[in-house]
Image: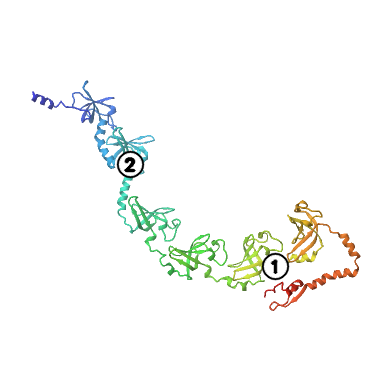
């Protein structure tokens, strides 16, 4: 009996089946909903069409051999249900999981597009999702160009329960690049000087390809001089030599230097450029405060604007321009601060040394107006020599704005009234070459004269009245009306024409006092008519006598006789007035 039972179990047509078994079968009858598969069981297994492999190409055919997994056994009806799709998943998911954990790449074939999301990828018959953002820059995005293409991928997500599988070609590329860079970085050593090619230029430096890897030359490592940005003489594609300063494997960065491929030129700079020595250089940059002159590569000195010329330029570009070859004298060379101070003007003779012989006081000269200020104008007499024409010396009239008299660029003839070479100052005058209208006024308008004038300005203390084109007088508030008034504006306004009497003249201060109050003219005329003739004659004579008494002469050793008033003579005798300067 035992032998018969063993033969029964070993019989070819009798096998034991369990759920989850993977086995091979032969297609007996393809159908639209169910495919019958011979798996060696007493009845054919049923394979629903939805359980066929997800990327099966073409229709399933009779006698086709396929691999399936038993998903369900119906013992009552004696039927078995199988799945080709789940068989493939079960067979390969373990291997894919190992790749997921290790990070090793897998190969997949792009099958179809997922609209507005990504692509379906076939991984050994298992459907995976490739997001569009993870396609990678080396592949086309069009599905017609991608379909059927075999590409390497990295598994980003794998969930057996939800059968979720997400892959990335971009991550695969990044991993490859990291491995490549790691191999490349291992070849470089700090201190090596190697050849490179400029790949890009940015504000903070240069990116240089040194053989499969781009290192950075920071702007501070381009030149031994301080640079705000890479100079324009560096171009993309240019071949250069660089020194490796640092290799950061963790951050995958290499720091490079151009300047350290040659010695530091500032070493021993004071010995090469001693104070007071003259050198020739090229103007390489101009700023508001001066010009930079290159003496040798990476060594530039500053010519401050005050050292450009003996004149007073407002802009260095008035004296030099870029690329000019100029002679300079070293004022200071400091290796520690890496600075050199230079002078251009000291290579030329100082024009102020002979200024008093060229432009003595009293000389009439010609110059060009170079600039206007509120207090006057500067006039260039020769290269490097500017003199001041003060606003008070522009005219005998009152000048409110120098631009009313002269303009920049005007050629003017003026008189030197002060020349001081030691203090580097010259003062000029235009009015000294004009007739003084004050003298003519004093002669023609004695005290008591009634004049016609026009009110030009009102103040709290009185009103100014223009008598002639050159002379104004002041009508004090007390002289405006016979009646007491608080403000001149109560009676007068600017532009009024008035008739006034001159009641006082201060020749020293050039001041004229006027009055609008009516004098007692009839009474004065009557008294004059009643006076005897000798008295009136004596009165006419007294001014002449007073004028003669007013003048005395005194001797001075150097300057000869000088005029002085009687009052000055008497005060000097009393010791109240000092002697004039010799």
| Spot occupied by residue 467 in the image (x, y as percentages of width and height) | 77, 60
Q: Looking at this view, name the residue that lies furthest to the front.
A: 574
Dot 2 alpha-carbon crowd within 10 angstroms: few under 14, some 14 to 19, many 20 or more: many
User: In this rendering, does residue 564 appear at all?
Assistant: no
383 with respect to 485 (left or right): left
Find the distance from the CA under tag 1 to the CA under tag 2: 93 Å
The 10 Å Cα crowd at callout 1, few under 14, some 14 to 19, many 20 or more, is: some
Q: Position of residue 316 (x, y in %)?
A: 54, 62
Q: Which quarter of the picture shows residue 194?
A: bottom left
Location of the N terminus by quadrant is top left
Which picture quadrant has residue 60?
A: top left
Q: Is residue 6 visible to the viewer in this orientation of the structure? A: yes
Q: Nearer the viewer, residue 413 or 288?
A: 288
- Residue 432 is tagged as 1
Q: Is residue 574 above or below residue 62?
A: below
How far across and how far down the image is residue 231, in percent?
A: 44, 57
Residue 52 falls in which quadrant of the image? top left
In this picture, is 567 found above or below 255? Answer: below
- Please give the residue where the numbered disc 2 appears in the rendered image: 169
Q: Is residue 262 left or right of residue 344?
A: left
Among numbered discs 1 and 2, the one appearing first in the sequence: 2
**Residue furthest out toward the top:** 76
Colour logic = rainbow
* Residue 502 placement (x, y as % from top left): 80, 61
| Comparing labels 1 and 2, the label whose residue is closer to the camera | 1
258 and 481: which is toward the camera: 481
Circle 2 SS class: helix
SS assignment at label 1? helix
Vertical arrangement, residue 96 with respect to residue 299, above or below: above
- Image quarter where the C terminus lies is bottom right
Residue 269 tag number: none
Picture residue at 82% right of the left edge, 71% below the top: 544
């Amino acid at each position: 009996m035992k032998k018969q039972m063993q033969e029964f179990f070993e019989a070819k047509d009798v096998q034991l089946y369990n759920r989850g078994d993977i086995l091979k079968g032969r297609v007996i009858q393809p159908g639209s909903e169910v495919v019958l598969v011979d798996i060696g069981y007493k009845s054919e297994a049923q394979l629903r069409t939805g359980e066929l492999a997800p990327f099966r190409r073409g229709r399933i055919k009779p006698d086709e051999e396929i691999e399936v997994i038993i998903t369900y056994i119906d013992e009552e009806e004696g039927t078995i249900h199988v799945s080709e799709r789940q068989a493939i998943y079960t067979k390969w998911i373990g291997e894919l999981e190992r790749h997921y954990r290790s990070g090793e790449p897998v190969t997949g074939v792009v099958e179809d597009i997922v609209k507005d999301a990504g692509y379906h990828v076939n991984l050994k018959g298992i459907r995976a999702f490739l997001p569009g953002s993870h396609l990678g820059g080396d592949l086309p995005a069009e599905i017609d160009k991608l379909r059927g293409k075999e590409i390497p991928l990295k598994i980003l997500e794998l969930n057996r329960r939800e059968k979720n599988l997400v892959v990335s070609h971009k991550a695969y590329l990044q991993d490859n690049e990291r491995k490549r860079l790691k191999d490349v970085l291992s070849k470089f050593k700090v201190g090596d000087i190697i050849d490179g090619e400029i790949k890009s230029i940015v504000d903070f430096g240069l990116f240089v390809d040194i053989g499969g890897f781009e290192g950075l030359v920071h702007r501070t490592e381009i030149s031994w001089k301080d640079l705000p940005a890479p100079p324009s003489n560096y171009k993309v594609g240019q071949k250069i030599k660089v020194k490796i300063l640092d290799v950061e494997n963790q951050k995958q960065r290499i720091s490079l230097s151009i300047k350290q491929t040659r010695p530091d030129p500032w070493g021993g700079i004071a010995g090469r450029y001693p104070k007071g020595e003259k050198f020739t250089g090229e103007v390489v940059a101009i700023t508001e405060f001066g010009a930079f002159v290159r003496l040798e590569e990476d060594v530039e000195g500053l010519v401050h604007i005050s050292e450009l010329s003996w004149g007073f330029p407002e802009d260095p570009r008035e004296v030099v321009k870029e690329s000019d070859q100029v002679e300079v004298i070293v004022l200071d060379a400091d290796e520690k601060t890496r600075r050199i101070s230079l002078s251009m003007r000291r290579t030329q003779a100082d024009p102020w040394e002979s200024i008093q012989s060229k432009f003595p006081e009293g000389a009439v000269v010609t110059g060009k107006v170079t600039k206007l200020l509120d207090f006057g104008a500067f006039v260039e007499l020769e290269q490097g020599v500017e003199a001041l024409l003060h606003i008070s010396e522009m005219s005998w009239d009152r000048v409110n704005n120098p631009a009313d008299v002269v303009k920049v660029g005007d050629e003017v003839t003026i008189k030197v009234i002060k020349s001081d070479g030691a203090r580097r100052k010259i003062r000029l005058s235009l009015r000294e070459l004009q007739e003084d209208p004050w003298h003519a006024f004093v002669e023609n308008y004695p005290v008591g004269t009634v004049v016609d004038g026009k009110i030009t300005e009102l103040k709290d203390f009185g009103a100014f009245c223009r008598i002639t084109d050159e002379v104004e007088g002041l009508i004090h508030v007390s002289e405006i009306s016979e009646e007491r008034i608080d403000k001149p504006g109560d009676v007068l306004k600017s532009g009024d024409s008035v008739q006034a009497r001159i009641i006082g003249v201060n020749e020293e201060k050039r001041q004229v006092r006027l009055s609008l109050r009516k004098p007692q003219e009839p009474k004065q005329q009557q008294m004059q008519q009643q006076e005897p003739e000798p008295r009136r004659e004596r009165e006419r004579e007294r001014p002449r006598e007073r004028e003669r008494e007013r003048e005395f002469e005194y001797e001075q050793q150097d300057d000869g006789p000088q005029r002085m008033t009687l009052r000055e003579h008497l005060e000097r005798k009393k010791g109240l007035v000092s002697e004039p300067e010799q």
